[in-house]
Every structure is written in C-alpha cells, then in structure tokens.
Image: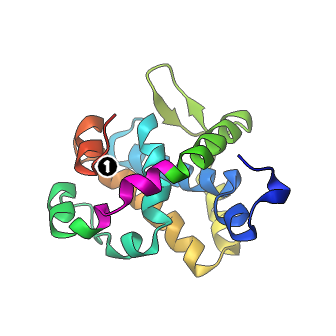
Amino acid sequence: MKKWKQRVKEEANLLNPAFLNVLFISAIKGYQEKNGEGLPYLYLFLIPPIVLHKSTRELLPRTIRTSLFTWLYENQKVKVSFFKRVASLKPFIQEAILFGVRANAIEIKENGMIISQTPSNAINKIFRTETEETKKCINEAKFLGKWFAGAGDVKTVLSLWGIRP
C-alpha cells in the first residue's frame, strides 16, 4: 500500500478506510435485519466492488425478493472483470478491516461473522453530510447485506459472482 500522501486524491477519498467501514457497517446492519446474525467475513470483499462500481450499482434490483441467481443470469455483464475489481480492491479492503477493528467500528467473531456495535444514528449522521453518490453507495451496501442474507450460503453467493472461497 502506498502512503497516504502518495495516493491519488480520488483513490484516497473513495477507498479510505473510514468510508469503507461505513459501507461495511451498512451491509452488516442490512444482514442483521434479515437474519439477526453477523455478516460473513468474506462478504466484506464483495461489498465495495459492487457498490463502488457505478454500472453494477445502478443495475441492482430494487427489492431483495429478486433472486441473486436470476439477477446475475439476467445481468451477466456485471461479472465481466468483477474478479479483477475484487483483486484490485483487496488491499484497501484489508486495510479498512484492520482500521475498523482497531477503531471498534466492526468486530470479527470467532465464527468468522462480522458484527458492528455502531449505532444506526451514527450512520444517519454521516448520511446527512454526504453527496448523493455517496448516499447511494451506503444505501446499496445495506441492500446487499439484506439480499445476501437470503441468497444462500457463503460458498453459493461467492460462486455465483465467480469467486472461489
């Protein structure tokens, strides 16, 4: 990882650990609303490549009743270069996970689930100060958390996206 002063401004803003943790926490909250458990650790590596990629984000369904399998079948173009996006974002996501754990924003449980004790009003406060684009990313992260909660087990979800655990 480059030092912060050496990073391109857009990269530093979009992929900063604090913002990625806001996305993580939103996804965790969505997942917990749907099934009451923490978010599986590996999903942290899917959230940013989906919500930060505008073309993919804009194609996401409006309801979690849409099957992930069916949606991916009907929108196969979202999987084009998805693995490359995941791989290129991996160091930033790992950095954000470490930041989130150290800042007590997220916690990794022994069973590999990620939980957050961050109150929803903290996310709402951040939400009020952000741009429309940022708000869309935060909303879609929460949507993904809910959607993934009903999409099957982790291996199934990852394989549908073309990722091997």
Q: Residue furthest top?
A: 110
Q: Residue at x 50, y 56 (%)?
A: 48
Whether residue 83 appears in magenta in the rendering, the answer is yes
Camera-side residue of 111 and 44: 44
For the record, the magenta segment spans 78-87
Image: 161 above or below 155: below
80 is higher (above) or lower (below) than 133: above
Question: For this view, does 3 lie left or right of residue 37?
Answer: right
Q: Residue drawn 64% across and 65% down?
A: 14
Q: Which residue is mark 1?
A: 148
The colour scheme is rainbow
From what the image shows, is residue 17 above or below residue 64?
Answer: above
Residue 69: in sight, yes or no?
yes
SS at badge 1: helix
- Percent from the top left, x then y, of residue 150? 25, 47
Mark 1 neighbour density, 10 Å: few (under 14) some (14–19) many (20 or more):
many
Question: Residue drawn 34% across and 34% down?
Answer: 165
In the image, residue 156 above or below residue 89 = above
